[in-house]
Amino acid sequence: MAQWLDAKVVSRTDWNDHLFSLRFSCADFPKFKAGQFTKLGVDQNGKILSRPYSLVSGPDDNELEIIAVPVEHGLLSPKLHTLKIGDSLKIMSPATGFLTLDEVPKSRDLWLMATGTGVGPFLSMLATEQVWQSYENIVLVYGARYEQDLAYIPLIESWSEQYASKFHFVPIVSREHKADRLHGRIPTLLKTLSIQQQVGLNIHATHSQVMLCGNPAMIEEATQTLGELGLSKHLRRSPGQISLERYW
């Protein structure tokens, strides 16, 4: 049965003035699957103001973590943005959601494509042994507007070093040009094969699974482009190659 638990902020990271991560403790929070989400909330006049957030932390981590932006005129996210170490918040137990590795059909290659805070569930997956043992090649495609909006780069680069033979990282920025970053939007770069050429792998229904998370427009357009490459949306009743989760 879903219930609210008490949690306490243990650290925070401000990636820039509008992108932040909160790390918090909650001893009673049950085991979850990488890729799942839950609700976070704050008490306001005796009522809990809440919204869902994916968990960035791995299932074996002793603490929980989320990444967020303070949405202008939002009810909750600006309040989360002001939280300091030691502050209290509420978390809904247990976590839920089906954007998990257990739901994905077996394949040779796994493509994780995210925009903005949609990278969160993929970071949780990459923190598990399961993902590294299950695929020959893992590609993280991470798009943002500006370089400063790409979070967790040191963590991602540590996986690049540890799993150099199977992990490929493709950072993308759409509103500035950087020498070591692809420029543009994920759907367009898929269509022109720029992403595939960057990692030296093709995307094909026989050996690829693609997980999409983030901006609904990106997901819709990427799904269409992947469909043109012969992939189809994955459903339990009709297995395919595209799994997705829209943010907002």
Image: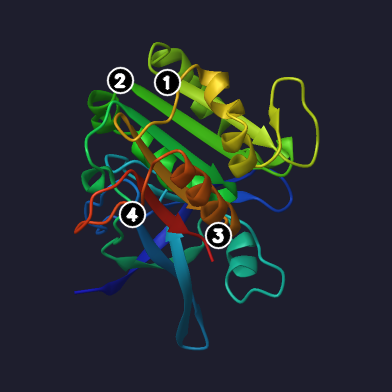
> What residue does disc 1 label?
167
Please give the name of the residue rendered at 43% of the width and 56% of the height, measured from the top-left corner: 245
Q: Position of residue 191 (x, y in %)?
A: 59, 37
The first of marks 4 and 3 along the sequence is 4
**Horizontal relation, residue 23 to residue 105: left or right:** right
Q: Is residue 129 visible?
A: yes
Amino acid of disc 4: Gln
Amino acid of disc 2: Glu
Using the numbered discs, state the Cα–Cα distance from disc 3 to disc 2 in whole angstroms. 29 Å
**Splitting the image into 4 quarters, where does residue 185 fall?**
top right
Using the numbered discs, state the Cα–Cα distance from disc 2 to disc 4 in whole angstroms. 23 Å
The first of marks 1 and 4 along the sequence is 4
**Splitting the image into 4 quarters, where does residue 123 fall?**
top left
Q: Is residue 120 above or below residue 245?
A: above
- Local SS, label 3: helix
The first of marks 2 and 4 along the sequence is 4
Q: Position of residue 154 (x, y in %)?
A: 56, 26
Q: Is residue 21 visible?
A: no
Please give the name of the residue rendered at 70% of the width and 53% of the height, measured from the top-left corner: 18
Q: Nearer the observer, disc 1 or disc 4?
A: 1
> What residue does disc 3 label?
216
Indicate which disc residue 36 carries.
Answer: 4
Amino acid of disc 3: Pro
Q: Nearer the viewer, residue 160 or 105?
A: 105
The first of marks 1 and 3 along the sequence is 1
Q: Nearer the viewer, residue 158 or 190?
A: 190
Indicate which disc residue 136 carries.
Answer: 2
- Local SS, label 1: strand
- Of the 4 image quadrants, the one containing the C terminus is bottom right
Q: Is residue 10 above or below residue 210?
A: below
Using the numbered discs, state the Cα–Cα distance from disc 1 to disc 4 in whole angstroms. 22 Å
Amino acid of disc 1: Phe
